[in-house]
Image (cartoon, rainbow, N blue to C red):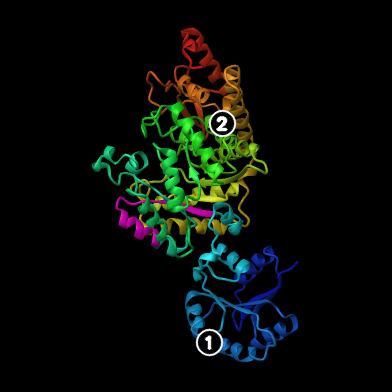
């Protein structure tokens, strides 16, 4: 059933109608009947059509000299008084024109060209402008907000300065800007690791990597600072110790929008904690279960942790599957699958897109009515240049490529990340850059995903990842019920080098043998001695050969 009629066109001697046509397209998508009035409508013509068609909304545009619109607007005000039913009056123009028209107080809504697509959609759905800032307008759960803004993706950005009060003020400034939907609190390492053990904190490290938060009350104060503007959701890094206790603090303190937890990392493997890999995996699986029981969405940001350490593409794709598989196995109902583009940073855009498409196909292969998967994309951390102007271009380019996968969420990476943490001003500017890209690509992006080279590489990666997954199941299937979801089996895969990365330090615990190189835009496993690339079957066969030769198979766990 149609919601009503929306009429739109330009007024007086103005012939600019592109904005009116685009607005009507959005209205049609939202279930309205539409009528395009075209350019240069006289006031008498507009009034006549309103009497004949009785529209719910009338949008009139003027983009010429500000002074010239005032007589037209006053004529409209006077002649509209005799209408039996007043429509919702909308005006759209340049900022100078809009400012003059707004002073008249006649139009219900005045658009000045600074609005983004999501604001227009919200107006059509709710009848209210985003800038009115009513808390009831903005959904306060991740899944509801995704539905509310669809097809426009949510925007999130990390934010956490070394000073608590600066961070609190910045949260409010970002919320008031209304440019993003999710503020991800970046907390310092002392908070992540020693929130419940203050005696272990090194004061010299306060503020290292994020905001120092020292109590549940301080988390609540940060949340309270966000209760303005467009009332963004808030989420936070997970802890690296006492993980469930900190999860409860985040749930009650900031209404944590979703939990992000690694499967293999934040432990002895990367030095971000002291836990053994298997212990950390079990705790991560417990974290998934804990949040699933409370209907809090979960993200396993596992694939890009391997990619950031220059693992070859096959491992990143396989880990996309294992992440989703573990999330489902341990009780998550809503799963955020994050795809970091540009890792390694020298990958070509086409091969990077192919990898993301393979990851998506693997992740979403386990989706069903009880396990919903949401796509989140982001630019790669190592990708952005130290020169801010170059970095801005890279951020825009990466976002344009990522829009090919129709994301539900865009994790905006501040253009300053190569040099320093983002200030509120940089967060806002970075989000505006991304919004500009979304505006240009949301309706009618070039379909790079259909490129035959992209599809061929995607299919190749899925085949390679399935080879790796089958190998894991074959190796451990007679020792545990479910190798893909077993912490002991997966941690042993790291110990043996089945799951490996060049940046893993080789020691008594971990292989650290894998070498990779970029070739034709792809990140591939590489045999330096032979001077050639390895497919996954060859790589895994060499692990078996090595273990058979040196007898290390006898030292496996299990």
Read off the residue under disc 2.
318
Q: Is residue 507 left or right of residue 533?
A: left
Residue 410 is left or right of residue 3, and the answer is: left
Q: Is residue 71 above or below residue 543?
A: below
Q: Position of residue 315 (x, y in %)?
A: 53, 30
Q: Position of residue 175 (x, y in %)?
A: 44, 61
Query: Residue at point 50% right, 42% down?
Result: 341
According to the image, label 1 marks what residue? Answer: 70
Q: Quadrant of the N terminus?
A: bottom right
Range drawn in magenta: 154-172
Would residue 257 be counted in the magenta stretch? no
Q: Residues within 10 Å of mark 2 (few under 14, many from 20)?
A: many
**Relative to 15, residue 124 above or below:** above
Q: Residues within 10 Å of mark 1 (few under 14, many from 20)?
A: some
Identify the disc placed on residue 284.
none
Q: Earlier in the sequence, mark 2 or mark 1?
A: 1
Where residue 523 sits: x, y (%)? 50, 32
Q: Secondary structure at mark 1?
A: helix
Look at the picture and state if 47 lies above or below 316: below
Q: Between 1 and 135, which is closer to the camera in this rendering?
A: 135
* Residue 160 appears in view: yes
């Amino acid at each position: 059933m149609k919601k009503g009629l929306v009429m739109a066109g330009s007024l007086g001697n103005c012939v600019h109608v592109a904005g009116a046509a685009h607005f009507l397209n959005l209205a049609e998508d939202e279930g309205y009947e539409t009528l395009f009035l075209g350019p240069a409508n006289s006031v008498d013509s507009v009034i006549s059509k309103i009497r004949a068609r009785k529209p719910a909304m009338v949008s009139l545009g003027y983009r010429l000299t500000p002074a010239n619109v005032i007589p037209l607007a006053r004529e409209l005000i006077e002649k509209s008084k005799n209408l039996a039913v007043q429509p919702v009056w909308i005006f759209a123009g340049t900022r100078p024109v809009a400012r003059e028209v707004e002073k008249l107080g006649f139009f219900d809504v005045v658009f000045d060209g600074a609005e983004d697509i999501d604001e227009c959609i919200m107006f059509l759905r709710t009848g209210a402008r985003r800038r009115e800032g009513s808390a009831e307008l903005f959904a306060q759960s991740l899944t509801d907000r995704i539905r509310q803004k669809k097809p426009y993706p949510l925007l999130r950005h990390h934010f956490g300065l070394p000073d608590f009060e600066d961070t609190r003020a910045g949260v409010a400034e970002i919320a008031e800007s209304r440019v993003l939907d999710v503020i991800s609190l970046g907390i310092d390492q002392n908070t992540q690791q020693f929130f419940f053990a203050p005696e272990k904190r090194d004061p010299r490290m306060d503020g290292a990597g994020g905001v120092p938060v020292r109590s549940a009350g301080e988390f609540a104060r940060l949340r309270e600072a966000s209760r303005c503007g467009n009332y963004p959701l808030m989420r936070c890094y997970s802890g690296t110790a006492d993980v469930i206790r900190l999860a409860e603090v985040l749930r009650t303190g900031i209404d944590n929008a979703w939990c992000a937890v690694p499967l293999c990392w934040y432990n002895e493997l990367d030095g971000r904690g002291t836990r053994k890999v298997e212990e950390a995996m079990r705790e991560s699986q417990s974290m998934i279960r804990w949040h699933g029981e409370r209907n809090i969405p979960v993200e396993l940001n596992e694939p890009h942790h391997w990619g950031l350490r220059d693992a070859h593409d096959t491992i990143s794709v396989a880990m996309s599957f294992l992440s989703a598989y573990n999330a489902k196995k341990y009780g998550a109902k809503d799963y955020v699958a994050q795809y970091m583009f540009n890792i390694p940073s020298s990958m070509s855009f086409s091969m990077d897109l192919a990898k993301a498409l393979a990851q998506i196909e693997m992740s979403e292969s386990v989706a069903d009515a009880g396990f919903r998967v949401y796509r989140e994309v982001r630019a790669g951390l190592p990708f952005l240049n130290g020169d801010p102007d170059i970095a801005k271009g890279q951020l825009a380019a990466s976002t344009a490529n990522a829009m090919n996968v129709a994301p539900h969420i865009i994790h905006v990476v501040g253009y300053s990340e190569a040099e320093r943490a983002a200030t509120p001003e940089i967060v806002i500017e970075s989000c505006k850059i991304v919004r500009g890209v979304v505006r240009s690509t949301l309706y009618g992006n070039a379909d790079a995903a259909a490129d035959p080279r992209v599809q061929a590489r995607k299919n190749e990666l899925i085949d390679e990842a399935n080879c790796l997954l089958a190998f894991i199941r074959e190796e451990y299937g007679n020792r545990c019920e479910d190798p893909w979801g077993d912490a002991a089996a997966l941690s042993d895969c790291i110990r043996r080098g089945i799951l490996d990365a060049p940046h893993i330090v080789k020691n008594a615990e971990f292989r650290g043998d894998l070498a990779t190189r970029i070739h034709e835009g792809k990140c591939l496993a590489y045999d330096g001695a032979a001077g050639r690339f390895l497919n996954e079957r060859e790589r895994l066969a060499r692990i078996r050969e090595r273990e058979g030769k040196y007898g290390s198979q006898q030292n496996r766990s299990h």
